[in-house]
């Protein structure tokens, strides 16, 4: 046998070494890959958990932003209404000024409005009934403290059969004028709404009026019925046996009587008397003497036309204000 050359032996040994090291290299790499895969799995799990956390945080953040945005919108709307009113008042004042007084007095007079009497110490809460149809108030709320019976937070009311004007608009028009007249007489006035877009329920209105120091709570409404011949004004008060506010019966009854009588005297509308009710959320949640004035029937031509005449509204408002004066004179 031919002795293998040294070269061949060396080549063989080198080859063998290569194969062995390749084997160990492959083994350790596979182990590393498996370990890395495990690591990747753990990291993936961690990432998924973090993603979930982040999602929850994002949802919370979005809800908070929504709420803040809603609040901002609400205050913007309020500020807008206030500034519109201010501008209107300014415009009214400057019109009067230019018409009747030399311009030198304008500034002094504008800074001190003269249409406000001295504070007479009384606070009146006014609730212009209902709100615009675009505001969803269908969610239920209890009709009185502790009651399991519920009613929609608010409804959108009736509409003038002849003028086409919605009740919520008429109620707001009259209420804003009533506010002005009462302020001229020295009352402080709390309004539950000053526009048609505010979403405030009947319960919330009653609570808000009382929380702002109102001594009485006057709810302004207009009636509607199937018969176009029904006409005239009526007031609503809690009954003597009302389960929530029977303690307010006497004062609410007197308040209703004072306002209804003065209103009918001023307007010449038929006086349909007081109706006693225990199912009105806005009455049952009141903590101060409360009344609803149903100013007339929007389904009656005479009532509807008159109630929506701006001149006649002044008469209506004077009548209501006289009733409020009479009430405070009696307590
Ligand atoms: Zn109404």
Image (cartoon, rainbow, N blue to C red):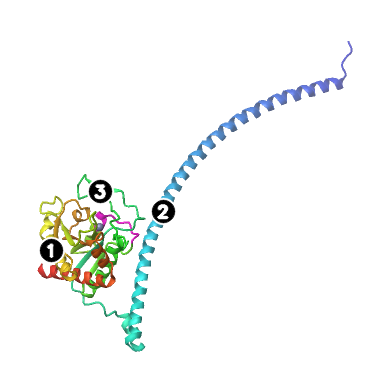
Residue 131, above or below 37: below
Residue 319, above or below 132: below
User: Which residue matches tag 3?
Assistant: 151
Q: Position of residue 154 (x, y in %)?
A: 28, 53
- Judge from the rendering whether residue 25 lies leftward or rightward of residue 225; answer left or right: right
Residue closest to the eye, 280 or 234: 234
Residue closest to the eye, 23 or 261: 261
| Disc number lying in front (2 or 1) | 1
In percent of the image, x 20 and y 53: which residue is there? 280
User: Which residue matches tag 1?
Assistant: 257
Q: What is the distance, in whole Å, between disc 1 and disc 3 at their CAs? A: 27 Å
Q: Position of residue 220 (x, y in %)?
A: 23, 62
- Judge from the rendering whether residue 179 lies leftward or rightward of residue 25; answer left or right: left
In percent of the image, x 88 and y 14: which residue is there? 3
User: Which residue matches tag 2?
Assistant: 66
Q: Which residues are magenta?
A: 196-205
Q: Residue furthest top?
A: 1
Q: Position of residue 259 (x, y in %)?
A: 16, 66
Q: Secondary structure at mark 3?
A: strand
**Neighbours of disc 3 within 10 Å: few (<14), some (14-19), many (20+):** some
**Which is nearer the N-term, disc 2 or disc 1?**
2
């Amino acid at each position: 046998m031919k002795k293998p050359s040294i070269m061949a032996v060396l080549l063989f040994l080198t080859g063998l070494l290569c194969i062995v090291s390749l084997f160990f290299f492959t083994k350790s790499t596979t182990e590393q890959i498996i370990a890395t895969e495990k690591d990747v799995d753990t990291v993936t799990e961690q990432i998924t958990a973090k993603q979930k956390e982040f999602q929850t945080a994002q949802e919370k953040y979005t809800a908070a932003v929504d709420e803040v945005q809603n609040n901002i919108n609400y205050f913007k709307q309020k500020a807008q209404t206030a500034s519109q009113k201010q501008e209107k008042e300014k415009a009214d004042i400057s019109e009067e000024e230019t018409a009747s007084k030399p311009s030198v007095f304008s500034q002094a007079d504008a800074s001190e409005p003269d249409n406000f009497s001295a504070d007479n110490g009384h606070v009146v809460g006014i609730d212009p009934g209902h709100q615009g149809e675009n505001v969803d108030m269908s969610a239920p709320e209890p009709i009185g403290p502790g009651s399991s019976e519920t009613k929609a937070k608010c409804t959108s009311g009736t509409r003038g059969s002849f003028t086409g004007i919605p009740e919520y608009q008429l109620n707001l028009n009259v209420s804003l004028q009533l506010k002005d007249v009462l302020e001229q007489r020295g009352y402080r006035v709390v309004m539950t709404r000053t526009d048609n877009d505010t979403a405030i329920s009947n319960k919330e209105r009653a609570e808000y009026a009382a929380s702002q120091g109102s001594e009485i709570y006057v709810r302004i409404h207009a009636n509607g019925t199937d018969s176009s011949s029904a006409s005239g004004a009526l007031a609503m008060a809690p009954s003597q046996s009302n389960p929530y506010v029977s303690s307010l019966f006497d004062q609410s009854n007197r308040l209703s009587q004072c306002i209804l009588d003065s209103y009918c005297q001023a307007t010449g509308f038929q006086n349909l008397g007081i109706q006693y009710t225990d199912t009105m959320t806005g009455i049952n949640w009141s903590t101060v003497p409360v009344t609803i004035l149903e100013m007339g029937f929007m389904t009656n031509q005479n009532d509807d036309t008159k109630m929506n005449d701006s001149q006649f509204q002044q008469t209506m408002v004077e009548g209501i204000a006289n009733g409020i004066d009479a009430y405070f004179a009696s307590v």
